[in-house]
Image (cartoon, grey):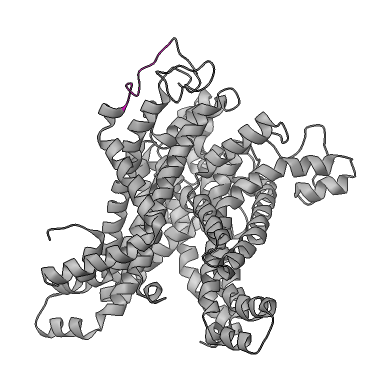
Amino acid sequence: MLRYILHKLALIVPTVFGISLAAFAFVRLLPGDPILAMAGERGVSPERYQELIVRFGYDQPIWMQYLNYIGNVLTGDFGISIATKRPVIGEFSALFPATLELATVAMIIAVLVGIPAGIFAAVKRGSVFDQATMGVALTGYSMPIFWWGLLLIIFFSGYLGWTPVSGRIGLQYFFKPVTGFMLIDSLLSGKSGAFASAVSHLILPSIVLATIPLAVIARQTRSAMLEVLGEDYVRTARAKGLSPRRVIGLHAFRNALIPVVTTIGLQVGTLMAGAILTETIFSWPGIGKWMIDSIGKRDYVAVQSGLLLIALIVMAVNLVVDLLYAVINPRIRVQ
Amino acid sequence: MTDETAGEGLSAEVPTGGRRRALAEFWHYFSINKGAVAGLVVFVLLVLIAIFAPLIAPHAPNEQYRDALLTPPAWYADGRAEFLLGTDAVGRDILSRLIYGARYSLFIGFVVVVFALVSGIVLGVLAGYFRGWVDTLIMRVMDVILAFPSLLLALVLVAILGPGLFNAMLAIAIVLQPHFARLTRAAVMAEKNREYVVSAKVAGAGHLRLMLVTILPNCVAPLIVQATLSFSNAILEAAALGFLGMGAQPPTPEWGTMLAAAREFILRAPWVVTYPGLAILITVLAINLIGDGLRDALDPKLKRS
């Protein structure tokens, strides 16, 4: 198992190097001058301009700039945001819990609904339930989620008036973040109504973000179950007279789970892309919205480090999924 | 090469009779899937709408009727029959804009797929055929592209290239292309040491002939399925970029761009938001239905069951 982990780690080293190079290169390619962008409307005198060029190391050869950048990143220095003049890593880590909370709740919804739906569809193959579920799943998979979010706002916030339109919690609730997760913090604050407010803010964005992963997981679970249900050992289990619940739950589902876990891992990238749109629609103060704003403001430093951090997070999650995969599937480990 | 149909690749280099039979077999399996046929019908309709947009659309897409700002659809009490799906904030007919928008979405999907397919195939064939450092280099670059969430990467690429429809298409093609490269590489590696390739090599076929004429036609099935999926993905991502203000720019009647402009009216005039999104959903759904049908018809493993 240790060899397997080391092997996987060795494989991602060139990718991590490539990601850092790409993040660095992209931002150098952005049009406009970073110093002028930093100076903003007021402009900057030629002397001051030279001074800043030297201070930020833009006078050095490009490979030297890259090495400096990597050196800084490795020591936890991701640079100072051009727009806010604060350390990027501070901004990122302040906003990341909001995205993590949204993505986690979305993933829980997707798994809790998607897996059972897929199992039932497979077990009742060809039934009305199967066809309806797969129809809904394909619709969800084809959904432009930014539009879906707007529709939900029109109906639940506009027409019914049940949910707020934006933000993470009602403005009347103000407390110091402890964990950064609003659901937990609102409970810890002890203020009545705070938790309900947090839930009502979270519900629509998490449904929107869950839509595509849910559809993918339901489809994948169904096809994995169908494949497994045709196997000899499932027939044997049935022939032995085991209850259908035991056959499906124990024999079939555990084996069908393997491709489903991979699928779930692959959805992390989808979640990050979805978070950009979802956070924009619901003004959710997470890193997706922060990236969009940073791109809009031409905040080079923020875009560069945001790209790097997001790609690294996605990679780290995929690595964990790979390892989980080896845990549930001994065949992989042995290879 | 007389008929450019999806099933053709399966039977390249087979005499006409065999090709027709393969095509008939393909259609047999495809048409079992009712959803796929429905998707195909909707898609053909969309193509016709796009082609004949100027004839079908009741109004010019950018004509502003100043006396009819935010008119609701015709079936509302204060709707007007001439604006079937209502008008937007500057009085443009939504139905006409949607009809013209079909041109953009289908064009985007088509161009992106062709671009991603061609570059992906070239890179994948090179990697799978030569292996060694060529393979390592190409596939590591693909890994890096795939490590970024696609929409985020497309956004940054568009920020570098400058917002606009063409740059958005280019960015989406770059983001989607690694899937084709990976598929092609895997298929080429599987085929490379088969007897028919070895015999062609012994007969003196050069690298280029081996790569493109001998091996490639036998790797087509998974690529067709991936191309269909990418077609719908491209439309979705282009719409998302348009929605974020980084794709087609106003007043282009691109569906995502229309949604971006409509956002501020969602509570006052829901129809401005509803129909462009519905158009995206129907188009993407139709293409995905076709994709499912193609996968069932072209995948020999599923065919058996």
Q: Does the magenta stretch include residue B284?
A: no
Name the residue at the top extreme: B67
The answer to whether residue A87 is above or below residue B266 is: below
Residue at left 44%, top 45%? B236
Instruction: Looking at the picture, tell me which residue is in the foreground, B138 or A121.
Output: A121
> Relative to B149, is A161 on the left or the right?
right
Farthest residue, direction left: B204
Per the rendered image, the range of residues in magenta is: B57-66
* Main secondary structure along the magenta-highlighted residues: loop
Q: Is there any visible trace of residue A315 in the rendered image?
A: no
User: Quick one: quadrant of the C terminus of chain B?
Assistant: bottom left
Q: B137 left or right of A69?
A: left
Is residue B195 visible from the viewing direction of this image?
yes
Q: Residue at x 22, y 65 (%)?
A: B23
Quarter occupied by the N terminus of chain B: bottom left
Numbered label tally: 0
Which residue is pictured at 35% across the width and 54% down the height? B37
Residue A115 in percent (x, y) is at: 62, 64
- Residue A60 at x, y percent in the picture: 43, 49
Front position in the image: B51 or B132:
B51
Q: Quadrant of residue A151?
A: top right
